[in-house]
Image (cartoon, helix red, strand yellow):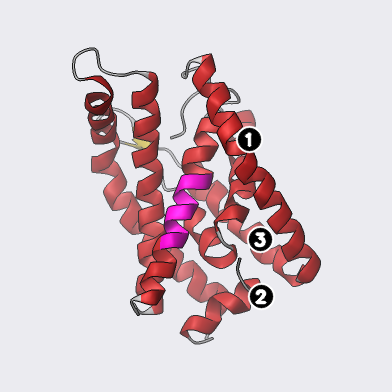
Amino acid sequence: MHIMEGFLPASHAFGWTVVSAPFVLAGAARIRTIVRERPEARLTLAASGAFAFVLSALKIPSVTGSCSHPTGTGLGAIVFGPSVMAVLGVIVLLFQALLLAHGGLTTLGANAFSMAIVGPWVAYGSWRLAQVVGLPFAAAVFLAAALGDLATYVFTSLQLALAYPDPVSGYFGAALKFGSIFAITQIPLAIAEGLLTVVVIEALSGKIRDEDRIAALSGGRE
């Protein structure tokens, strides 16, 4: 992540675009509802998109010869729910492909599915589970953002393995190889993203106590 322009076979690029489309449409409907019911949430929506853009635009060299970066999608998933991040993530990825040559247009669907769909849903699921088991607010935010980051890269490894299975060990061997390329760099980055997300949410929500903080930011979730 980001998978570069032209790297995926055309059938895979088309398939991931088709699979991603319903999530993006659902996210657009969710954003319309949020803006209609709570116009004051526009600023937080913009901040969530900007956070994802800045973090995912970073290119940090990996000791395995690739590069890696945080994703920044956990923040929006926690505040507004995962469907919103499908739209914000596509916008982020589109601008990065056009302005930064980071990712690509043909691979937009695949990149969107891993970073804007899988990552946010894992982040949101982790956030809700952490609430159920009674983790402190900061710990729940950290866990959600970190796991959402890691999930993006795990799923990207699976996408690449599906496109380019190993001649000997097949799909699973390729998935292991692609995953190992990211793992050494991505684990500390996921930890860093989790910590940064806690700081940002604390700053946005001020001194409101625990379970009331996210509701104060978004006016409610899906």
> How much space separates mark 1 and mark 2, taking CA atoms?
28 Å
On whether residue 90 falls in the magenta region, the answer is: no
SS class, disc 3:
helix
Asked if 158 appears above or below 148 in the picture, the reply is: above
Q: Nearer the viewer, residue 191 or 29?
A: 29
> How much space separates mark 2 and mark 3, taking CA atoms?
12 Å
SS class, disc 1:
helix
Task: Give coordinates of residue 76: x percent, y percent.
Answer: 56, 59
Residue drawn at 52 percent across, 74 percent down: 203
Residue at image mark 2: 219
| Residue 45: mark | 3
Asked whether the viewer can see residue 147, the reply is yes
Q: Nearer the viewer, residue 36 or 74?
A: 36
Asked if 221 appears above or below 118 in the picture, the reply is: below
Residue drawn at 40 percent across, 20 percent down: 163
Identify the residue at the far left of this view: 168
| Residue 94: mark | 1
Q: Bin the neighbour count of mark 3 within 10 Å (Cα to Cα): few under 14, some 14-19, many 20 and up.
A: many
Q: State which tag comes first along the sequence, 3 or 1.
A: 3
Q: Bin the neighbour count of mark 2 within 10 Å (Cα to Cα): few under 14, some 14-19, many 20 and up.
A: some
Q: State which tag comes first along the sequence, 1 or 2.
A: 1
Q: Bin the neighbour count of mark 1 within 10 Å (Cα to Cα): few under 14, some 14-19, many 20 and up.
A: many
Asked if 76 appears above or below 189 in the picture, the reply is: below
Task: Give coordinates of residue 57: x percent, y percent.
Answer: 51, 41
Name the chief secondary structure element in magenta. helix
Q: Quadrant of residue 20?
A: top right
| Residue 197: mark | none
Asked whether the viewer can see residue 100, the reply is no
What's drawn in magenta, residue-wise? 117-125
**Residue 131 left/right relative to 65:** right
Q: Quadrant of residue 172?
A: top left
